[in-house]
Image (cartoon, rainbow, N blue to C red):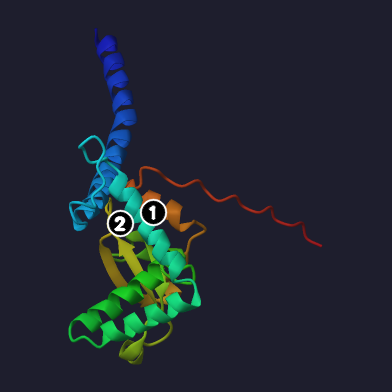
Amino acid sequence: MTTKKATLKAVFLTGLLVLVPLGITLWVLNLIIGTMDETLLLLPESWQPRHFGMRLPGLGALLTLAFVFAVGLFTQNFIGQKLVSWWNALVRRIPLVGPLYSSVQQVSDTLLSSNGNAFRKALLIEYPRRGSWTIAFLTGAPGGDVVNHLQGEHVSVYVPTTPNPTSGFFLIVPKSEVIELDMSVDVALKYIVSMGVVAPAAPSRRPIDPPL
């Protein structure tokens, strides 16, 4: 009887391991697509596309993606770049809005631009105390007046929380106390999100060359 219960429990857990990730993935996709579909409400009611008297799910998401792609395509030419530069200069002159817009633009440029330096390296640092280690990501080097109060070379790092890596802590630590990992950012994020359950494979070691 105990063996049958253990077998049933194992089968049930196996089913959960298959369905839970699938269910969460579908829920997240439904949330994203549903949110993007709400952009259709910004159009006049007479312009909102309908089929058989019903709104098609996912159509707003497709239109949003097409709009983003069209904006990116337009801003790649000379006229589009000039208009974007004019718009940025105009918004920056607006009180309260200008500083906020500039800050968000700098962060988005750093995170989304292919030339950005954010999350380019996975690091190992001692945090939150000595003897306790965690994974962090290199975000750059300290700047401004902060540099005048630091002795030696320091780096700026982001320490994400688990299982939600979108929140975390910004730290400035000595470069000598940072260990660069032989691990991609994607693998490190997966390691953090899984709370250490999905451990990355050990890097292959190069064979030691025989002495000459």
- Callout 1: few (<14), some (14-19), or many (20+) C-alpha neighbours within 10 Å? many
Depicted 145 relative to depicted 139: above or below: below
Q: Which residue is mark 1?
A: 189
Answer yes or no: is residue 119 visible: no
Q: How many marks?
A: 2
- Residue 163 bears which disc, if any? none
Q: Position of residue 59 (x, y in %)?
A: 30, 45
Question: Considering the image in quadrants, where does the C terminus appear?
Answer: bottom right
- 26 relative to 211, above or below: above
> Quadrant of residue 110 in the image?
bottom left
Residue at x-position 25% and y-position 49%: 37
Q: Residue furthest top?
A: 1
Tell me, yes or no, if residue 77 can be seen here.
Answer: yes
Mark 1 to mark 2 CA distance (whole Å): 7 Å
Viewer-proximal residue, 95 or 176? 95
- Image point (17%, 83%), residue name: 96
Residue 201: percent from the left, percent from the top? 50, 46
The quarter of the rendered structure image containing the N terminus is: top left
- The residue tagged 2 is 165
Which residue is found at the position 78% from the left and 60% from the top?
211
Q: Name which residue type carries label 2.
A: Pro
- Find numbered disc 1 in the image and state the secondary structure of the residue it sits on: helix
At x 66% / y 54%, what residue is drawn? 206
SS at badge 2: loop
Point out residue 104 in the picture as x, y percentages from the top left corner. 29, 74
Q: Residue furthest front?
A: 46
Question: Do residues under tags 1 and 2 come within 8 Å of each other at their CB atoms?
Answer: yes
Q: Point out the tag, 1 or 2, that comes first from the N-terminus.
A: 2
